[in-house]
């Protein structure tokens, strides 16, 4: 399989968006269109292979060389800090990473006065760095499920989470206080693969770059 180019793609909407984008430069996999539950798909004619993995695992598969390229949200890259080449913003999967708190608290709260706070989040590394840069001590509570639940039951007063429309925050009586980062999906590349399969990978990057530049409506 050394002559194959392997992609690690998150299951779900991002995989669908990725394959639609790849198709614009001739990268397709008919096997994926059959609704199979397989985790590895191949196009033997063009020598492309696609792995369906959990989003948070994409950087690991790419870093260790099981995949040559991958697509993953910038939030995951910020949190994990893997040693990867990140050549392209793919301009889809847009959302924001924000600090949020209950609406009732925000009416009398001033973030400028924060000194020691407790925050629930899926992103402890990003959160710690963000508040450390502001000189704010933070007690972090790592959660994996619905972060909005934490303030509702008194686990923490504030959260750091991803929002798209903000509807979930609103439904749970919360408001955005600060934006940490704007998030989109990124193309990532294994550094060794970039050397050993340089020509094919650069061709993919340049092809995608051209498509993205010509299709500004892909963003947000």
Image (cartoon, helix red, strand yellow):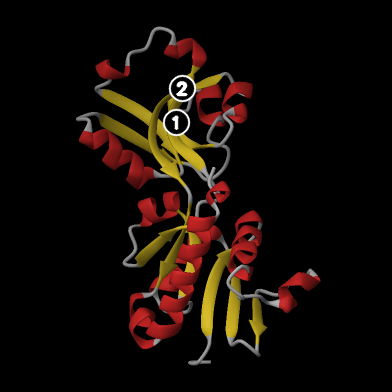
From where the camera sits, is residue 140 visible?
yes
Q: Is residue 12 above or below residue 203?
A: above
CB under 8 Å between discs 2 and 1: yes
State the image quarter where residue 148 is shown.
top right
**Chain-order first, disc 2 or disc 1:** 2
Count residues near mark 1 (Cα–Cα under 10 Å), then give few for <14, some for 14-19, many for 20+.
Answer: many
The percent coordinates of residue 151 (x first, y second) are 50, 24
Relative horizontal placement of residue 14, taking residue 65 as reference (left or right): right
Q: Is residue 184 above or below residue 45?
A: above
Estimate the spatial distance between the alpha carbons at disc 2 and disc 1, rounded to whole Å.
6 Å
Residue 159 has which mark? 1
Relative horizontal placement of residue 197, taking residue 14 as reference (left or right): left
State the image quarter where residue 126 is shown.
top left
The percent coordinates of residue 12 (x first, y second) are 66, 57
From where the camera sits, is residue 36 visible?
no
Question: The residue tagged with tag 2: helix, strand or loop?
Answer: strand
Residue under pointer 2: 101
Residue at x-position 27% and y-position 42% = 129
Question: The residue tagged with tag 1: helix, strand or loop?
Answer: strand
Outermost residue, bottom direction? 2
């Amino acid at each position: 399989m050394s002559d194959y180019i392997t992609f690690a793609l998150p299951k779900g909407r991002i995989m669908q968006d990725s394959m639609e984008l790849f198709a614009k430069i001739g990268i397709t996999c008919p096997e994926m269109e059959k609704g199979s539950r397989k985790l590895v798909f191949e196009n033997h004619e063009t020598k492309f292979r696609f792995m369906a993995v959990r989003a948070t695992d994409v950087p690991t598969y790419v870093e260790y060389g099981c995949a040559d390229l991958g697509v993953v949200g910038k939030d995951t890259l910020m949190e994990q800090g893997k040693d990867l080449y990140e050549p392209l913003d793919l301009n889809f999967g847009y959302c924001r990473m924000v600090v949020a708190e209950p609406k009732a608290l925000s009416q009398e709260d001033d973030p400028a006065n924060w000194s020691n706070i407790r925050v629930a989040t899926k992103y402890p590394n990003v959160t710690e760095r963000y508040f450390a840069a502001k000189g704010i001590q933070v007690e972090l509570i790592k959660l994996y499920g619905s972060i909005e639940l934490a303030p509702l039951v008194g686990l923490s007063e504030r959260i750091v989470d991803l929002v798209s429309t903000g509807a979930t925050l609103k439904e749970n009586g919360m408001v955005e206080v600060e934006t940490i980062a704007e998030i989109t999906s990124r193309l990532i590349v294994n550094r060794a693969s970039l050397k050993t399969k340089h020509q094919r990978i650069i061709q993919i990057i340049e092809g995608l770059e051209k498509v993205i530049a010509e299709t500004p409506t892909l963003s947000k």
